[in-house]
Amino acid sequence: MKMYVKFDFNALCKKVLDEKLKEHGLKYRLLNFGEVEFYEPLTQEQHSLFKQNLEDYGIEII
């Protein structure tokens, strides 16, 4: 059996990003697509863990 699904790539990425930011307990707000504003500076460890976590979903920090 096959099932065809339709999805909104932008909404999907935003949802994953939002969930991962919350998991890490970071204070932020999502701006435009692919843009995040942090209210507090990230430590090197927070940045590394967050980056690694996003890479599991094919999301890269640029």
Image: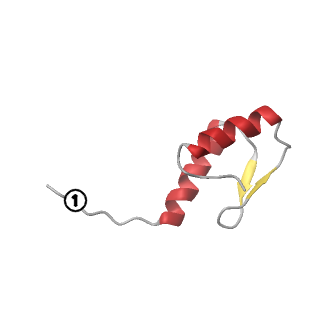
Q: How many marks do you count on the picture?
A: 1
- Image coordinates of residue 30 in percent, x first then y, are 69, 58
Q: Does 16 appear above or below 35? A: above
Which residue reaches farthest left? 1
Q: Which residue is mark 1?
A: 3
Q: Is residue 52 left or right of residue 47?
A: left
Q: Residue at x 52, y 62 (%)?
A: 11
Q: How is the image coloured?
A: secondary structure
Which residue reaches farthest top? 45
Which residue reaches farthest right? 41
- Image coordinates of residue 55 in percent, x first then y, are 59, 45
Q: Residue at x 58, y 58 (%)?
A: 14
User: Helix, strand, or loop for circle 1?
Assistant: loop
**Circle 1 crowding by C-alpha within 10 Å: few under 14, some 14–19, many from 20:** few
For the C terminus, which image quadrant? bottom right
Front in this rendered view, residue 61 or 24: 61
Q: Does 44 appear above or below 16? A: above
- Image coordinates of residue 8 in percent, x first then y, are 45, 66
Q: Does 34 appear above or below 22? A: below
Q: Is residue 18 left or right of residue 43?
A: left
Q: Is residue 41 left or right of residue 12?
A: right
Q: Residue at x 76, y 44 (%)?
A: 27
Q: Residue at x 60, y 45 (%)?
A: 54
For the N terminus, which image quadrant? bottom left
Quarter residue 19 falls in: top right
Quarter residue 52 falls in: top right
- Image coordinates of residue 7 in percent, x first then y, are 40, 64
* Kind of residue at badge 1: Met
